[in-house]
Image (cartoon, rainbow, N blue to C red):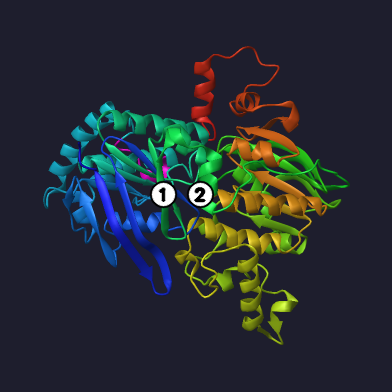
Amino acid sequence: MNAPAIELKGISKAFGPVQANKDISISVMPGTIHGIIGENGAGKSTLMSILYGFYKADAGEIYVGGNRTDIPDSQAAIAAGIGMVFQHFKLVQNFSVLENVVLGAEDGAMLKPSLAKARKQLKSLAEEYELNVDPDAIIQDIGVGMQQRVEILKALYREADILILDEPTGVLTPAEADQLFRILRRLKQEGKTIILITHKLREIMDITDTVSVMRRGEMVGSVKTVDTNPADLAERMVGRKVLLRVDKTPAQPKDTVLEVRGLNVTDAQGVHRLKDVSFNIRAGEILGIAGVSGNGQSELLEVLGGYEKATGEILLNGEAIDLTGAHSDGQSRRNRGIAHVPEDRQHEGLIMEFSAWENTAFGYHHDARYQKGALMDNKAILADAQEKMDRFDVRPPNPMLAAKNFSGGNQQKIVVAREIERDPDLLLVGQPTRGVDIGAIEFIHQQIVALRDKGKAILLVSVELDEIMGLSDRIAVMFDGQIMGERLPSETDETELGLLMAGVTDTDAPHSVKEIEDNLAHAGTGEKV
């Protein structure tokens, strides 16, 4: 029998009082796609970071191809044929694709021969694994799907036979995720071994051969994917039965809270990002905005949140909101009763170097309950942060830790807790469960529905169609900066929404599959389709 491609025995790792991994053993067979799932903070990324040499285990052994292997750093991992694509890419934004691939793997002091060699190998790798990308493109000018291909190419260029992907679809559109999975299946056919860290059960069921489940730093068990199902995996992850659908009663909408009329935004490059956008949201309902990422949803949230100037008209509870920027910013929006969970938690929702307790107060630090005379009452903020972290099950529940030391899902919980707990009239929420595990998804969905049931208006932006279908009371679809139409969840399906997302309306003439794919490929780029 073939030796496992990777075998970990008795791996343990602690960070101070936090036991991230406890006596973990796992075996991954060659030429397979092996999934690792678990809640945020379960220790998945820590375990893989040990395998890749980012951390050194406190105890345990690593075997590669049946041979015990010491991996003190990432160079040792690369030498052992292991590559890793991190959730947040490790690319130099103003370098070209070619320069990023070569970086750290140069053949000598002279860069020109290394670049020439890499260009030739990239062409070969791109053809073999369907990883087509322009080698001269600058990273900051290409989308996240292409950037992920660059990370995979980096690993393959370094001759990796074992590829670790950490939450690879967290920043991808559904179409980009499908393309990634086609690439992974191709890699598997070529004999590569793939370890996939994800919290998305549908992805596990679609692409993996075997799945291992982690909970609170320990390995719960491994099972062949064909022998399990989403409900079983969710229960193993969380330790209890999990509702895999949104449980909510029909909405009871009342007065209009938000009216948007003829909203237009043009960016610094002259691209028309929002084009005469109009809609309304009533108290006690959730309006979901569906669409491929880059079709104006982000700009819409930025205008409503006070980050972006626009023309048109916005009314909140019947009163106009300034769109010129003269009297408009995030603070003024919060003062008017608008809370905002931004799409990018790390750059817009948190200050990563600051502690969790400080982050729970950002934007609301002028609140009277946080003041003590002329100074801020840090003790009150700390106590409030601890309560929020307990209620929202943030792990570890330590408000003194810096935001950067929490997993992505727990960072999201901190942001969601801060905004929802303000009891706003209008909640703007972008990608609420991006990078969040199944148990936390259930909890966040419950909080959003509870806020709706309290008579609040909610604008939900998500690239996850099942999330849009499950949470929304009404669905508006955006394409190329425009609202293509509105639907009731009970009267539509993912096929119809997908056509609207590709710019195909009921009144359009029949479109070919090629035409629809071209529309999706160019959506949000500013290019004429």
Q: Is residue 142 magenta?
A: yes
Disc 1 to disc 2, C-alpha distance: 9 Å
Q: In which quarter of the view is residue 312 placed?
A: top right
Q: Residues within 10 Å of mark 2 (few under 14, many from 20)?
A: many
Residue drawn 50% across the image and 66% down it: 403
Q: Amino acid at mark 1?
A: Gly
- Residue 211 sits above or below residue 361 on the image: above
Residue located beneath label 1 in the image: 221
Q: Which is nearer the N-term, disc 1 or disc 2?
A: 1
Q: Position of residue 56 (x, y in %)?
A: 27, 64
Q: In which quarter of the view is residue 159 placed?
A: top left
Q: Amino acid at mark 2?
A: Arg
Label number found at residue 236:
2
Q: Residues within 10 Å of mark 1 (few under 14, many from 20)?
A: some
Disc 1, SS? strand
Residue drawn 39% across the image and 55% down it: 45
Magenta range is 135-143
